[in-house]
Image (spheres, rainbow, N blue to C red):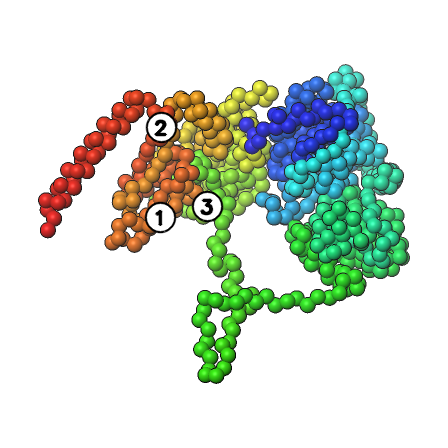
Amino acid sequence: MAERSFVEEVKKLRLGAGELFSGEGILAVTKALLESGVAYVAGYQGAPISHLMDVLADAQDILDDHGIRFENSASEATAAASLAASVNYPLRGAVTFKATVGTNVASDALANLASGGVTGGALIIVGEDYGEGSSIMQERSHAFAMKSQIWLLDPRPNLPCIVQAVKDGFDLSEASNTPVMLQLRIRACHVHGQFIASDNRRSAFSIKDALENPARDVDRIVLPPASFLHEREKIHERWPAAVEFIESRGLNEFFASGTHDIGIAVQGGSYNTVLRALERLGLADVYGESQIPLYVMNVAYPLIDSEWERFCEGKRAVLVIEEGQPNFVEQNAAAILRQRGMSAALHGKDMLPLAGEYNTTTVMKGLRAFFEQYGVLAPQPVPRKVIPLLAVPATPAAPGTAQAAHPIVADALPALDDNVHARPPGFCTGCPERPIFTAMKLLEREIGPHHVSADIGCHLFSILPPFNLGATTMGYGLGAASAAALNAPAGKRAISVMGDGGFWHNGLTSGIANAVFNRSDNLTVVVDNSYTSATGGQDILSSTALNPTRSTGHEIEDAVRGVGVTWVKTVRRTYDLKTMKATLREALTTATKGPKVLIAQSECMLNKQRREKPKQRKAIAAGERVVRERFGVDSDTCTGDHSCIRLSGCPSLSIKPNPDPLRTDPVASVLDSCVGCGLCGEVSHAAVLCPSFYRAQIITNPTRMDKLRQRVRDAIIGWLQRRAAQSRARYAF
């Protein structure tokens, strides 16, 4: 199961030459791959390119029709290594993964690939989620492209440019025998638009041809002396070939040339933002016509010396707009201008922030400073924002004088941080991972705190309130490896946590097998929710769902025992808080030596609801009996202690005013978003708090027996209530 289905949209991938394609950026990329004659595609899901993997999975029949091999890779390294098929054979291949975390994992394979070079076109599609939409460290893949000399494309974020960049990327790769990286921002991945389609092409040379006619060239393998020749080949052959191709094909674009003696150089991915900022400053119209010369670098690396010289010729100054730090483009451009004796002043990070995403407001400020310095815009005084204060009484005026006004200067207002509470990310309602950390917090009260090494995934939210568990996180599947050094005889064991996605990605070898080999005595908790939930709910080896194109149902416990772990326990239902707590206690206190692995299983609630809710709606519409479980809190019984909230953190748990006028503390309340997982009730019993939680059944389309049963209940409850009321009246004074 994936976060979103593209079953209907993928039908557009069959459009032929001259037909109008309308859709999302990710669909356009897939269509461009088909039109480019790609032979194989691989990748690892992760925002913002998770949907590309989902599109490819839903388009399996179209891929099969064109003889295209598609794989959901075990990791980004696996995906990048698969491009080895393009080294000796004229096969076009593409791989995709997320940003720097993906290029980090794949960097070894990418470096070897770039060193030996490729024969067929090799395209690496990187979902670069730098900025406010990112969930990872703020870095860019630009440095990896420069390090390994992989050409980096950053097209303007509209569908025609993205599609053309895919096709140009393959051509550039083959023209220079070098892999090419295509960088797509979040908004480019999900932008909607149109382009004129071309016919899909089947690869002239197939994977079957490669298998039946094996070829090898030892000069392409990274071993001395060939590895020394690779570096020379990069500089003297591949780089000039790439520059010639970029210039002749016109991959970079010039707009409004010769209209002014200043200019703006911008990477293609930021083009829309810059144009919008210019429009708001009155220097461009709504149709995208700029009054200021623009040099749009759809190729962010390498920079083309001759194009920079052409653009800067006769200009007083040029502003480089480049997100992130270091400012690779600005530094490179400065060297080019200096070497060529150009007199144009170069600006960039001196007028724009050193780091952070460049939104329209940020770019406007930088552009205004640049334009004011060079006389394009007149300096404007910044008005002092004044807000009338109406809530505070005015100071009484002296007799015979006018009433004085009482303004508030905006700078004097309290900061939002002091008034608006932070809203950190957290687990979904009913998440099966929440009871795992509830059990850890309850056990912490009894045997004390332990070092907890976290991992990438949903369970990382346990670091935040209300659980406050977890000391480090080093990378996907590296939870156990992060605690490897903390392995010594002591009164306590270290705990590491990883998800099932991270387990299959990297954790089995770097974490579990490493713990076996080094005789670790620590505990690893593997959270098995049946999917790679943090990337969109895609299936993995241990998924319980039947996948017609993938092999699923492989138990994590079998894999763990297979590498030598002897103490392995599986909790089949994480919502069973008592069992969860007891198993954790056993793992942390047992005298058994060696690594201990606890597998905590329950299906991801988000994916479960995506599957079950449509079924429920269909059944209700058909008049069938549907029973849903809900939990609630008896306001008269609740003590207002709120430990249930502190030990659960469920978004459906809230508070409301106490109905008892003699008690001022608010009582707990269950909102309508409750999915009936039962954790709140489990917590109330496990923590020995209060009996205020109750479980109710909501029946849609009840049967006659349901209605009769409810009437009997109402009659008995009503009789008991009347009897209690009579007793109170008898003893009333």
Give the quarter of the image for residue 301. Answer: top right
At 67% from the left and 29% from the top, the residue drawn is 42
Q: Earlier in the sequence, mark 2 or mark 3?
A: 3
Q: Is residue 222 visible?
A: no
The mark closer to the camera, 2 or 3, is: 2
* Callout 2: SS: strand
The residue lying toward the viewer, choosing from 182 and 584, is: 182
Q: Amino acid at mark 1?
A: Lys
Residue 401 drawn above or below residue 359: below
Give the quarter of the image for residue 46. Answer: top right
| Left or right, 697 with reference to 550 | left
- Residue that carries the numbered disc 1 in the rendered image: 656
At 58% from the left and 44% from the top, the residue drawn is 135
At 52% from the left and 61% from the top, the residue drawn is 415
Q: Earlier in the sequence, mark 3 or mark 1?
A: 3
Give the alpha-carbon distance from disc 2 to disc 3, as whole Å.
Answer: 39 Å
The residue lying toward the viewer, choosing from 470 and 33, is: 33
Q: Is residue 703 visible?
A: yes
Asked if disc 3 and disc 1 are in contact, CB closer than 8 Å, the reply is no
Residue 592 drawn above or below residue 203: below
Give the alpha-carbon distance from disc 2 to disc 1, as whole Å.
Answer: 26 Å
Residue 575 placement (x, y as % from top left): 39, 34
Q: 10 Å neighbourhood of mark 1: few (<14), some, or many (≥20)?
A: few
Asked if disc 2 and disc 1 are in contact, CB closer than 8 Å, the reply is no
- Residue that carries the numbered disc 3 in the rendered image: 469
Task: Locate the N terminus and report the quarter of the image it occupies.
Answer: top right
Q: Amino acid at mark 3?
A: Leu
- Residue that carries the numbered disc 2 in the rendered image: 699
Residue 356 placement (x, y as % from top left): 65, 52
Residue 469 placement (x, y as % from top left): 46, 45
Residue 303 placement (x, y as % from top left): 81, 46
Q: 10 Å neighbourhood of mark 2: few (<14), some, or many (≥20)?
A: some
